[in-house]
Image (spheres, helix red, strand yellow):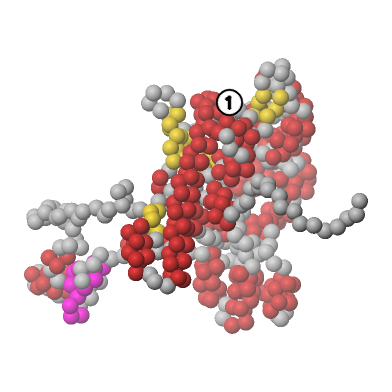
């Protein structure tokens, strides 16, 4: 059979992801902050969109003030009733400075102006009086300008400040800074030594031992024995008390006093200053006990952007538009506005649908606590609500649920299953982690539980069939040291005490 090119027409069905469909999918995984930013950009770009401010979209009618003012009156509205400083001082037959020392005496300045009100009787901006925490770099720059006298030294100090991390430690080497600035290493070391006493004490340190040494030197407590303790911090971290006593050359009582003094120091002095804006976590869904039993699930309307399509404005502008480019722009704006309002409503309904199913499957956790957290996967929720797993994954990303047991990310409720030894049920991995932490917290100093022992206890008490390797993995994930280190720590604390 000879091969030859030819044309054929075939009919087939396929799923095509349009740009708007892809955008709708992307809206599902946005947090409420990212979603509000996207909606704000659309409001600026699309003239047919407007924000729904009230429940009915109409502004509230102004409330008429009564003619008579009570004891507590509106200072802004009745600011003109306040007498001037000169009039009040004249009534007391004295000078203005004796009555209002801080008041201005130039023409037209009255008591209202001295209180912070403008000439028009406007209220002062309260944001001007809110105390703000300074940045660490600004706080150190002010001190460096007073300590150092020459411009080259100040330039080196400024470069050292720029290389501090959030904890106040110097993140760059002195050799690298000297090479970058073209300065001598001795000059950089001299500047560093001069500014290491800045507030907060401990900044500009290159490691933990130096940070603690700077603070002890400020307290005049950096004696040779304390210096030896700082040089052997790794022994202190491992609670190897016998080796620590041999290295330092002191008794247990002195060691306990020095450790107590180290605990009073700040290992991260730079954390006391703002390093950037801190965003509070706002829940997307509220779960409350229902009056008739069960749970009431509702969306947080405060974080849901509500927009409307102004069709009256569209009709007015469309009737006056004659050119094709203008009509095409209006048609695109109307289509985008309709798509956005529909997508926002669909996104809210999808979040609510997924949240209701999570609450239904995790009723035991909400009622009795983490020990009753059931194993749940994305597939289980997707099949229950007739959605795809990827949709559930996007919906639960960056979303938070406020429950009677606290604020949780939606992803928290999805845990793997651990088989039961009797084959009658499964246990949630998060519940197993919680039980492991409980067993380790309750263990006595003389009977520290090994991973094998914990696995045996879980199997004997709760029928959880878990291997020693799994216990070790969960323990390491919770930053809990091994039984050998825990035994050494507990015995070390007993010896020091």
Among all residues in the image, which is located at the extreme front?
1
Left or right of residue 336, residue 412 in this image: right
Q: In this view, does 288 lie above or below 299?
A: above
> Residue placed at 25% from the left, 65% from the top?
123
> Residue placed at 45% from the left, 25% from the top?
294
> Residue placed at 17% from the left, 62% from the top?
77
- The answer to whether residue 59 is visible is yes
Count the labels in the image.
1
Residue 114 falls inside the magenta stretch = yes
Residue 108 falls inside the magenta stretch = yes
Q: In this view, does 94 lie above or below 373?
A: below
Left or right of residue 249, residue 169 in this image: left
Looking at the rendering, which quadrant does residue 448 occupy? top right
What are the residue bounds of the magenta stretch? 106-119
Among all residues in the image, which is located at the extreme bottom?
151
> Residue placed at 74% from the left, 27% from the top?
466
Instruction: Quadrant for the C terminus, please.
Output: top right
In front: 169, or 89? 169
In front: 203, or 302? 302
In front: 211, or 365? 365
Residue 458 % position (x, y): 70, 23
Residue 177 % position (x, y): 70, 73
- The residue carrying mark 1 is 372
Q: Is residue 351 above or below residue 18?
A: above
The local secondary structure at tag 1 comes to helix
Looking at the rendering, which quadrant does residue 88 occupy? bottom left
Left or right of residue 360, residue 47 in this image: left
């Amino acid at each position: 059979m000879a091969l030859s090119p030819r044309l054929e027409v075939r009919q087939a069905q396929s799923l095509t992801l349009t740009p708007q469909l892809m955008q709708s999918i992307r809206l599902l995984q946005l947090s409420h902050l990212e979603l509000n930013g996207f909606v704000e950009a659309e409001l600026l770009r699309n003239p047919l969109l407007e924000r729904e401010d009230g429940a009915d979209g109409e502004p509230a009618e102004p409330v008429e003030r009564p003619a008579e003012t009570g004891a507590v009156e509106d200072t802004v509205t009745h600011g003109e009733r306040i007498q001037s400083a000169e009039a009040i001082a004249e009534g007391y037959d004295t000078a203005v400075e004796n009555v209002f020392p801080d008041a201005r005496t130039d023409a037209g300045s009255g008591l209202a102006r001295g209180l912070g009100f403008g000439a028009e009787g406007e209220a002062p901006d309260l944001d001007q009086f809110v105390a703000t925490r300074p940045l660490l770099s600004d706080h150190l720059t002010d001190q460096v300008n007073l300590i150092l006298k020459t411009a080259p030294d100040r330039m080196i100090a400024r470069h050292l400040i720029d290389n501090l991390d959030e904890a106040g430690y110097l993140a760059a080497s002195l050799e690298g800074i000297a090479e970058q600035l073209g300065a001598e290493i001795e000059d950089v070391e001299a500047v560093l030594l001069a500014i290491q006493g800045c507030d907060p004490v401990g900044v500009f340190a290159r490691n933990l031992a130096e940070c603690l040494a700077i603070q002890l030197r400020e307290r005049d407590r950096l004696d040779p024995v304390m210096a030896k303790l700082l040089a052997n911090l790794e022994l202190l971290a491992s609670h190897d008390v016998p080796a620590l006593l041999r290295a330092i050359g002191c008794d247990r009582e002195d060691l306990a006093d020095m450790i107590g003094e180290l605990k009073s120091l700040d290992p991260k002095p730079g954390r006391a200053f703002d390093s950037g804006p801190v965003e509070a976590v706002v829940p997307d869904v509220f779960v409350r006990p229902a009056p008739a039993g069960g749970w009431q699930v509702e969306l947080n309307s405060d974080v849901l952007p509500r927009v409307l399509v102004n069709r009256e404005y569209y009709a007015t502008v469309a009737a006056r538009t004659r050119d094709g480019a203008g009509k095409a722009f209006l048609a695109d704006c109307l289509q985008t506005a309709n798509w956005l309002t529909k997508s926002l409503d669909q996104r809210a309904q999808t979040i609510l649908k997924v949240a209701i199913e999570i609450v239904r499957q995790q009723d035991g956790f909400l009622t009795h606590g983490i020990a009753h957290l059931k194993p749940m996967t994305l597939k289980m929720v997707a099949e229950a609500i007739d959605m795809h797993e990827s949709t559930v994954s996007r919906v639960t990303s960056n979303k938070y649920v406020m429950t009677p047991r606290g604020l949780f990310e939606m992803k928290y409720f999805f845990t793997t299953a651990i088989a039961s030894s009797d084959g009658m049920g499964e246990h949630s991995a998060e519940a197993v982690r919680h039980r492991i932490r409980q067993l380790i917290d309750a263990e006595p100093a003389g009977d520290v539980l090994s991973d094998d022992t914990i696995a045996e206890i879980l199997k004997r008490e709760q029928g959880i069939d878990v291997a020693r390797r799994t216990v070790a993995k969960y323990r390491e994930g919770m930053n809990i040291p091994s039984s050998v280190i825990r035994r050494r720590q507990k015995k070390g604390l007993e010896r020091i005490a």
